[in-house]
Amino acid sequence: MTIATPVSPAIRTLDDAHSDLTFAQWSHRLTDPALPARTLGRYGEAATCQWLRERSWHILDVNWRTRYGEIDIIALTPHRTIVFVEVKTRRTTRYGLPQEAVHPAKQMNLRRAATQWLAQQTPKVPHIGIRFDVMAVQVHGDEVHMHHIPEAF
């Protein structure tokens, strides 16, 4: 499912955990070709958090780091499934689709990191299952196209 979301200045902030910039401010910055990839990635993560919250998901953690790497977003669905979301944000498909960057080695590291996150939760988060999703975010001018891939691996 691909959703084209025009950037709207009417929305106050993307996500308090990520940024205090408004969509209008992000929109202006997204068109800057010198925008660092890390900043573009933060935008994709914040936009994904907003997208998930609009669907009544509860964000449990963001940018959780371990020796195996970072889990971008950990969320709980309304049906009590813990979802580990890998966000890939791109301005171009020159090097492939965003989701293609979640290769087998990355998947293995995300599984290991998720195991650590689950083990460290005190108290335990009540849930009925876990899964791994990918959110592919493509920025085209002032539009953001988000493609959610549930159970990606």
Image (cartoon, helix red, strand yellow):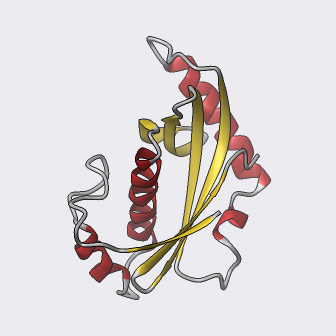
State how many labels appear.
Answer: 0
Residue 31, position in %: x, y?
37, 86
Give the left or right position of residue 75, taking residue 68 as reference: left
Q: Examine the rendered structure and indicate whether residue 15 appears above or below residue 131.
A: below
Where on the picture, by quarter, is residue 138?
bottom right
Q: In the rendered view, tell whether residue 104 sits above or below residue 113.
A: below
Q: Is residue 20 above or below residue 75?
A: below
* Left or right of 9 in this view: 33: right
Is residue 45 rendered to the left or right of residue 95? left
Q: Is residue 101 left or right of residue 27?
A: right
* Residue located at (50% from left, 37% from top): 75
Vertical arrangement, residue 137 with respect to residue 32, above or below: above
Q: Nearer the viewer, residue 14 or 122?
A: 14
Give me the residue at 73% from left, 50% from top: 152
Residue at screen point 48% across, 40% down? 65
Q: Give the residue displayed 66% in from the left and 30% down from the top.
A: 130
Q: Quadrant of the N terminus?
A: bottom right
Q: Nearer the viewer, residue 2 or 141?
A: 2
Image coords of residue 71 (percent x, y): 54, 43
Residue at the extreme top: 123
Foreground pick, 21 / 7: 7
* Rendering coords of residue 56 (x, y %): 44, 40
Q: Nearer the viewer, residue 10 or 110?
A: 10
